[in-house]
Amino acid sequence: MPPVAPSTSRPLLILGYGNTLRSDDGVGPKVAEEVASLRLPDVEALAYPQLNPELAESVAGAGLVVFVDAALDASNGVELRPVKPAASSQMMAHAADPPTLLALARDLFGRVPKAFCLAIPVENVAIGEQLSLLAQRGASAAVEKVKALAAERAG
Amino acid sequence: MAKRIIIDPVTRIEGHAKISIFMDDAGNVSDAEFHVVEFRGFEKFCEGRPFSEMAGITPRICGICPVSHLLASAKAGDAIMAVNIPPAAEKLRRLMNLGQIIQSHALSFFHLSAPDFLLGWDTPQPKRNVFGLIASNADLARAGIRLRQFGQEIIEILGGKKIHPAWAVPGGVRSPLSEEGRNRIRAWIPEAYATTKLAFDLFKKTLDSHKKEIQIFGNFPSLFMSLVDAEGNWEHHGGKLRFTDSSGSVIADQLEPQKYYEYISEAVQSTSYLKSPYYGPLGFPEGMYRVGPLARLNVASQMGTPKADAELKKFKKFGRGAVTSSFLYHYARLIEILASIERVEAYLEDPDLLSEDLRADAGINSLRGVGVSEAPRGTLFHDYTVDRDGLLKQVNLIVATGQNNLAMNRTVAQIARHYVHGNDIPEPMLNRIEHGIRCYDPCLSCSTHALGQMPLQVQLVAPDGCVIKRVTRG
């Protein structure tokens, strides 16, 4: 499997991840599903419970990656935080964090795109399937941010 | 002074566990134990739920083997409804299980185990992981990730998503396989074969340099159990149960999985949340048996597909009767990946696979239903008792890792006896002991049906309870 070949058009990759059975922790996948339903041009949106190593290839082929996740420490609303690849790290084999996944993309496929984490403020991660009002508002704001990013890239 | 060494956490397995090694006064290993500190309680909190929800609830036990629980749960529901599901649904469920075997075994081999036997036991820990593997053999690492992805793709194409697909239900499955989906799966086959061959070639080269590991990593007599078909061949989703012993003799055959409780009993141990199933007629702990890839290959007369059967012949030369070394679980996994690819390839040519006749409907026709399937790690049982409204009164889940519990204890003890002496616990020794556990590819989230995490600890404890030494990881 060769490294990623150059491409003139790489998508904006939205990776929304989290546990949909832990209330607000499911906000990441829900945002990704909402974005996917919009069918924005040059935008690929994926919803996952965890960041698996298989995502490294998609990450390596993206023009820009946005990880969407619940954040208990986002005190100023939805925040777009830059993410850098890890130098090298031990990964739980079935799941990774964003820096580790970026490092895997770099080491396996020779390319790591610019990346951000879209941190959505949440308040409840107990067992359940409903988003709190805070998370719902954050999800809406996150979708708008993604639309703005997509428009900026298209412009 | 006698002491106990505990390895905590055990890395590169799914879940969290602790290994205790008990030393005697002479500084030799007297015993060892693998115990799990998670507690989850699925069997309890599912009581009162409609049985039809279990196919959605039980996959949440685990993010690695949700498909295994999904399929076993659906089968238990089929039994409660007393239906034979449509043939196309049966084939599609089998196809998904094959995808599950491929992805899980690929994860185990490439990510969890290969760093040890391909990079070397004494490679410093920061490099003895999948990134070290990437650095030394990037093509292998990429191929391994892609092989896992293939299995995940089968699951996603059938079930709509890779993890926790809500697709198999009591009575059948929710949706058919499309022509487009079938073509997508078919397109992966050549690469999947090539990667498996690469893994075989690499692993076989390591066998000569791992003779010691083959000898002492869980090499002892035991029973073995798995599903087999009517001819006694490898079976991953239906059939009946067979027990064999270390000489390769069949000691019980064509047992009805629905009546598992007539020959499988469970022991509870005070030091672990992991139950210990055993073959009842021989009592505890003499009735210890192993499940999973090693067991399936020992139990089966043949794999039933040509490439895998050719490899099975070579595999069987590692034992007299049965292959008893747990180190060779890795070899067995590769053979099962190969068999699964062959079966996937054959299934794809079956026109029935695109049928839309996928569900059987019925009410509550039995107050107890048992669903049994071969998960990648071994035989999985879902046993539901319901009331007339279909609400669960009792749930019993017997998972592979629990059935391998006693064997894992014995494996740890065996390895520890060879490598641990006195107070010296060098890190590569710890990794050999951990690897003994990794041979079984345990899924601790499943085996304790647990949620929540506790970090592991390693403690050296004297017989009087004093902690002599503590080692931690992670």
Image: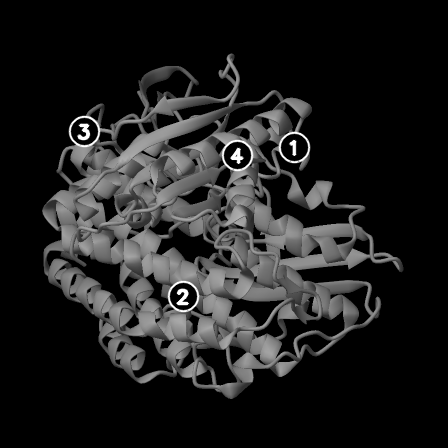
Q: Which dot, 3 or 1, sits closer to the camera? A: 1
Q: Which dot, 1 or 4, sits closer to the camera? A: 4
- Relative to B60, does residue B371 appear above or below in the rendering? below
Quadrant that contains the C terminus of chain B: top left
Q: Which dot, 1 or 2, sits closer to the camera? A: 1
Do badges 2 and 4 share one subunit?
A: no
* Residue of label 2: B295
Could you tell me residue B257's position as x and y percent? 62, 70
Q: Secondary structure at mark 4?
A: helix
Q: Which dot, 4 or 3, sits closer to the camera? A: 4
* Residue of label 1: A127
Marks 3 & 1, CB-CB < 8 Å contact? no
Q: Residues within 10 Å of mark 2 (few under 14, many from 20)?
A: many
Q: Nearer the viewer, residue A6 or B119?
A: A6
Q: Secondary structure at mark 2?
A: helix
Q: Residues within 10 Å of mark 4 (few under 14, many from 20)?
A: some
CA gap between label 3 and label 1 equals: 41 Å
Is residue B244 something that shows in the picture? yes
* Residue of label 4: A143
* Residue of label 3: B426
- x 29%, y 25%: residue: B25
Do badges 4 and 3 share one subunit?
A: no
Query: How many numbered marks are there?
Result: 4
Name the kind of residue labelled 3 in the image: Pro
Name the kind of residue labelled 4 in the image: Val
Residue lying farthest top?
A: A75
Is residue B264 something that shows in the picture? no
Q: Residues within 10 Å of mark 3 (few under 14, many from 20)?
A: few
Q: Secondary structure at mark 3?
A: loop
- Relative to B55, does residue B82 appear above or below in the rendering? below
